[in-house]
Image (cartoon, helix red, strand yellow):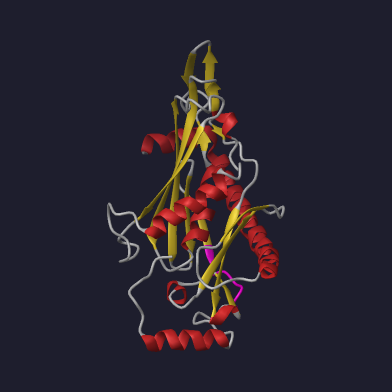
């Protein structure tokens, strides 16, 4: 993960010693997440997630296009990650960092390759027309936990998004506006979440949701992606200190508890957002659209 401005050797030693004594600088338990806040925008498919001081906004969009030649019965789903220099000095405009590529790759495996989104439901006319769904991940502030925060934002935005309703007449596709028909939610088969475990002190200390300062003293990371049913979508480890195979079983059990918590949070915020929109009904939606 990216490095903020390098901390001093004394600070590193202080953090390491504190972790050996099961103490974190922010007072959390070693296996605890920071406070998570989730909110949705006025438009469907915009999710704003704050994990401590880390902030990520995910935006979903869709358009009708031609499918890939070798996937005639599938729609298209792509994920693009943008790390702003405003979020961290480690990021530069126009120069993708290793972290940016890593986050995009892990989110791709977690959501797209796990079959979370039913891409066949995006097909309109086989080999001719389909929906192309794009997820843009914008990192606005970085203080550790980027992948976990980005995954929550992505899943929440996908569940919140509504694509335009369509009618297929022969070889023609008619896309209906908001005033004509209610938009349609995406077909999500399951909701995976990423939980990152960081290793310190030769693997004797395991952290959940490491801050940017803690990330500078960790010796390795393991990312466990799973849904609330306990189905593992991926286990990723890129370099660092070795991890015992049996320890991975303990990590999956610990990850399941966190995944259920994240899934409940997303459901709760979605229900709250739906109630707000139902108060005004379609008239309120149209008024909001006109105001924009």
In the rendered view, does 251 fall on the left or right side of 176? right
Nearer to us in this view, 130 or 68: 68
Residue 189 placement (x, y as % from top left):
65, 41
**Magenta part of the protein: which range?**
29-36
Q: Please indicate, yes or no, whether residue 217 appears anywhere in the rendered image.
A: yes
Q: Residue at x 61, y 40 (%)?
A: 188
Nearer to us in this view, 24 or 267: 24
Q: Which quadrant, please, contains the C terminus?
A: top left
Q: Is residue 215 above or below residue 75?
A: below
Nearer to us in this view, 198 or 273: 198
Q: Residue at x 34, y 65 (%)?
A: 88
Residue 13 placement (x, y as % from top left):
44, 88
Q: Is residue 247 above or below residue 95?
A: below
Q: Please indicate, yes or no, whether residue 273 appears anywhere in the rendered image.
A: no
Q: Residue at x 48, y 51 (%)?
A: 105
The outermost residue toward the left is: 93
């Amino acid at each position: 993960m990216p490095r903020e401005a390098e901390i001093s050797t004394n600070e590193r030693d202080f953090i390491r010693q504190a972790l050996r004594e099961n103490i974190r600088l922010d007072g959390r338990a070693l296996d605890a997440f920071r406070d998570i806040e989730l909110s949705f925008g006025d438009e469907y498919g915009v999710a704003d997630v704050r994990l401590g001081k880390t902030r990520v906004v995910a935006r979903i969009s869709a358009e009708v296009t031609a499918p890939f030649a070798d996937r005639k019965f599938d729609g298209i789903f792509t994920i693009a990650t943008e790390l702003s220099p405003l979020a961290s000095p480690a990021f530069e405009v126009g120069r993708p960092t290793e972290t940016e590529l890593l986050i995009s790759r892990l989110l791709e495996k977690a959501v797209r390759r796990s079959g979370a989104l039913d891409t066949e439901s995006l097909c309109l006319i086989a080999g001719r027309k389909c929906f192309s769904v794009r997820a843009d991940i914008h990192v606005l502030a970085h203080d550790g936990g980027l992948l976990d925060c980005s995954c929550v934002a992505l899943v929440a935005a996908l569940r919140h998004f509504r694509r335009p309703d369509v009618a297929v007449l022969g070889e023609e596709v008619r896309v209906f506006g908001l005033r004509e028909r209610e938009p349609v939610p995406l077909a999500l088969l399951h909701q995976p979440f990423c939980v990152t475990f960081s290793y310190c002190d030769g693997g004797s200390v395991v952290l959940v949701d490491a801050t940017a300062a803690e990330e500078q003293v960790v010796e390795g990371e393991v990312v466990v992606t799973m849904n609330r049913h306990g189905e593992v979508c991926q286990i990723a480890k890129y370099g660092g200190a070795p991890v015992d195979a049996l320890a991975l079983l303990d990590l999956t059990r610990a990850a399941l508890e966190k995944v259920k918590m994240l899934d409940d949070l997303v459901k709760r915020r979605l229900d709250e957002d739906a109630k707000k929109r139902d108060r005004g009904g379609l008239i309120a939606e149209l008024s909001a659209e006109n105001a924009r």
